[in-house]
Amino acid sequence: EVTRSCRKFIVRGLYRKHHLLFGLMMALKMETTSRIVHDQQILVLIHGGGALNIEEHPNPLPWLPDKQWMNVIALGRLPEFRSLVSSITTSSCAAMWENWYESETPEHDCLQGEWSELTEIQRLLLVRCFRPDRIVFAASRYVSQVLGAEYLDTVSVDLASIVEKESSPVIPIMFLLSPGADPSSDIEAL
């Protein structure tokens, strides 16, 4: 209940485009506190392989762009992904990885072998490293799995409830408006 209330108050002050990012931050913080997610995973999620040098790690895969290859190298440094690079470059698994990479929805597709039992954070990391274009969908899935689908819904502002429950003659309501926002009609309706 505290998490829900906290989210409700904070999301009210955010632009809609930032709601998912805040939900992701909440989910990661909760799983870090529970020791399900560790700091190294978060660093790979944020940075990927951006600090690595392609000359030190040449890309052997013609179907995978160099930037994604650097992300895979960084991900392969995590203990749970230590066999990732060899799995991708092994001829028996390369086709599976290429098919997954080219999938329209890799965040939902299942992998085979040792990669069939991924946790949600591991799946998020794989999508981030291979398919950064699908990270929003993978993050939505992660937030939904960790916190629940309700944390993906936008919070509608009920001005009457705010006036009734959260303000008084000595506690005013302040509106910080962005260009184009006009709550005048809602205020006059009270």
Image: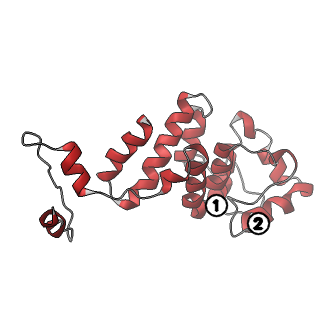
Q: Nearer the viewer, residue 134 or 50?
A: 134
Q: Which image quarter: residue 31? A: top right
- At 32% from the left and 45% from the top, the residue drawn is 9
How would you rate the neighbour count of disc 2 (Cα within 10 Å): few for under 14, some for 14-19, many for 20 or more? few
Find disc 1 in the rendering and name its residue: 131
Instruction: Name the kind of residue labelled 2 in the image.
Output: Pro
Label 1 element class: loop
Residue shown at 54% from the left, 39% from the top: 43
Question: Relative to residue 101, is residue 169 drawn left or right?
Answer: left
Q: Nearer the viewer, residue 58 or 120?
A: 120
Q: Is residue 74 visible?
A: no
What is the residue that sits farthest to the right in this orientation? Answer: 92
| Callout count | 2
Observer able to see residue 64? yes
Locate residue 92 relative to residue 61 in the image: left or right: right
How many C-alpha atoms fall within 10 Å of the one at disc 1: few (<14), some, or many (≥20)?
A: many
> Does label 2 or label 1 sit earlier along the sequence?
2
Considering only vertical position in the picture, is 105 above or below 129?
below
Contact? badges 2 and 1 (CB < 8 Å): no
Q: Nearer the viewer, residue 133 or 14?
A: 14
Of circles 2 and 1, which is in front? 1
Mark 1 residue type: Arg
- On the image, the x and y values in percent for residue 188 come to 12, 66
- Which residue, given by chain and number where applicable, does mark 2 sit on? 62
Q: Is residue 131 left or right of 98 when viewed as pictured?
A: left
Quarter residue 130 falls in: bottom right
Place of residue 177 in the rendered image (x, y in percent of width and height, measured from the top left): 19, 61
